[in-house]
Amino acid sequence: MVEALRRHGRRPNPVYWVGLARLVRGAHVDVIAEEVMRSTGVVDVSGRSVRKCVEGVLAGDDRPRGRGAVLVMDNCEHVLDAVGPLIVGLLQAVPGLTVIATSREPVGWVDEHILTVRPLTVSNAVELFRRRAKIIGRPVSDDPEQLAVTEEICRHSDNNPLFIRLAAARLRHRPLGVVRRELSGDSDDRRMQWSHGAKMGVEERHGGVRDVIAWSYDLCSGAEQLLLDRMSVFAAGFEVHNDVTRSGGAEPDAIVAVCADECLPAEEIESLLERLVERSLVSVNIASATVRYFLLESVRVFVSGQLRLRGGGPSEAELLARLRRYYRDRVVSGRAIWSGPGQRDWLEWARGAWDNILLGIESGLTTPAEAVIGVETASAFISLRAPFVISHAGRAMPALIERAVEAAGGIEVIPTRLRVAALADVGHFALWHGQYDYAAKLLDECVAACVPDSRLARGWRDTPGSDIGLPAELEFFWGVELMLRGSDPHAPSVLARARKKFAEAGDLAGQRRSDMFESLACSLTGDGQHALEVARRHLDRVLESESENADWVNPWARLAWMLALLLHGDPHEALKVGRTVLKRYRAGIDPWTTSWIFRFGVAALARVLADRIAREDAHRDDWETAAAEIALLHGAVAESCRSMGITVENIATVAAQTKRVTELVTSIIGADGFAAAMELGAQLSVESPDLHALMLGTRSADDLLHATTTDRRAATSRWQDLSPAEREIAVLVAAGWANSAIAARRGSSIRTVDTQVSIILRKLTLTTRYDIITLVPQELIKRIQLEARERPTRLRHLQH
């Protein structure tokens, strides 16, 4: 209200304030008018009606022109049917009048200017909490750990000023850490029992979190309350000042699928959602092409309690089962569009739906049959390469598959084919993280489950050229293992078998994926001419069958051709192909794909430079510039893979390329020059426009290597906008820690860390976590290097 007065009121103008909270719901318009008259101080009505008296005072005929009155009507939501007509009448009768109405939903006037009150910023929320803690005699120190806990309390309190005051009041009887644990967001959450503990100076409706939410909830219709209660099974969201939520919320189709039935018809849900947004009980995230709805955590806790108290209708468990199946079906549907332009939309959907996908899987782990749904969801999510694109999903999904398989009870409950496919996906992911022994163990287990003949099961690795009846998913897993672990020349034939079996099963996604990896494997392990032929055929097939807008298949078909040219053909042509991919698909490619463009590009540039040196082409200064460019790009590639936890240096061909690049560049610019350029490249990341320009040949390394200290200071000044806790998390992100590992270290949930990282990116005005390193102050670089060495890398093993 104060902010509204500041923006819309003019200090010389008379201001009248009317508090309506004490009025009963549905009060008559005349009762509202009497409250307004009382606020103006009018005592003598002289036979006039109340409204005429009010109009006369507000008009102020003896007032100078331009001194229109400001009428503040506070807490209108429960008497809107009366307030609306009164406001309209006053505005028509009193020229120059300004009415400021505070309400949890709009008044409804045609020319109403709505000023939404946002939650506090993180820093303001923490400051308010500390101020209130100090008032009650339990101050919060400047210790980073205490500040981090305080920030989490504020976040789980929705950065709501009143809720923060209530949380701080708990410090009279609880330590800081216990207050944080009371905000679990689940059935054991204690915030609904909080109160000020004050006997005076507190309105009844502000006595506790429950009172605040119940005030608005009780104003809702029965259908609105029912929808709210059922929406409690979705993941909570977190609203920040730029209208971005950490979870993205749930799309209308999801809400209909989970909440609709004969008591809540599907065709009514959209209008009910809009009403609940108007009532400030449901939050909305409106993007360019999507709209998503979510509940703030405190609202979710309240209505989940209401849902448990309801009799009849679907229970919380039944609603969660619907949610689980909806997101399973949406994830699996991505396979049908895997090789087309629709995959970009699917990945964007998956980013926004991540919290609900995760919730669906985790909530079913206590029931074997429901855990199977989780296995199907997580396995499809990995097979669609989402963890390579959605960074925070990279560590979580393989671990979730393991937990879901274990919860499903093994082969007795979960179908063998599904279990094998899921563990094959986990193994595939483990291979890219350099966990070869673990992947081999999973592969052995899967083969044993699929091959009943014990003789074949014992010697299956000795016969890669023979088909022993393994399913397509397992053939693919085996082929990738042969390619990555030992550059085995049998890898292409095993992957070709996988491609054929996927095609026979009608699995286009698996077929395309196997086809692409067969091409890569031929280049990495096979004969030169044959590798070129296979890669060219693969590219031609893709170009013939897919549109040029395909997001995944086309770029990687060209990358496979680039690799074949790099290893067995003309490096100049390889470089040209890589630059074409970067230019043509720049808007749609992800950090994983970009990293490989850069990796192959670095190797191609090194070969081109080596040829120039052998021919003594150009001056040594040009060689040094080219060497510095290669080192910059190489540093960005190494940092990108490290930040994603990807290990490719154990691939024999890749290791040989890296060694050649290092030796060549070091021989030209020296070890120190190589290290300096590598470090700068690591700071810029593969998504940096500067490095893209360098890769495309439109910018020189000199521009980047000689960037001024002033530019660096200007960039890092945004670092000061982070709170101490956010800086700690940013350092770990810059060091390549996954959100799950950060959560384990800090003793918080993955979803909490997801929120914190999202806020950090917004504050730093960055788009990806990989760019955080570019804004870290120079004095923290050494610490980041130390944290990188301590970064957890192992997946949790299955317990049998």
Image (cartoon, helix red, strand yellow):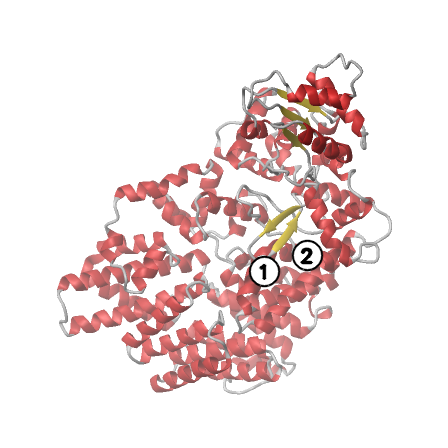
Q: Residue at x 72, y 14 (%)?
A: 42
Dot 1, how many residues are within 10 Å of its Cα: few (below 14), some (14-19), or many (20+)?
some
What's the residue type where badge 1 is placed? Trp
Q: Is residue 605 above or below residue 44?
A: below
Name the residue nearer the viewer: 471 or 543. Answer: 543
The vertical placement of 461 against 719, above or below, is below
Q: Pinpoint residue 642: horizontal percent, then vertical percent.
A: 41, 57
As drawn, the residue found furthest toward the right would be 312
Location of residue 301 in the rendering, given as x and y in whole percent from the top left corner: 71, 42
Work out whether 732 lies above or below 491: above
Q: Position of residue 110 (x, y in %)?
A: 66, 41
Q: Badge 2 is on which residue?
A: 252
Total numbered labels: 2
Whether pointer 1 and pointer 2 mark residues with C-beta atoms closer than 8 Å, the reply is: no
- The residue drawn where x is 63% and y is 58% is 357
Question: In this image, 487 relative to 116: left or right?
Answer: left
What is the secondary structure assignment of the residue under circle 1?
helix
Mark 1–mark 2 Cα distance, whole angstroms, equals 13 Å
- The spot of residue 494 in percent (x, y) is 50, 82
Read off the residue under disc 1.
349
User: Quarter of the image containing the N terminus?
Assistant: top right
- Quick check: can you spot residue 490? no
Q: Identify residue type, mark 2.
A: Pro
Identify the mark at residue 515; answer none if there is no mark: none
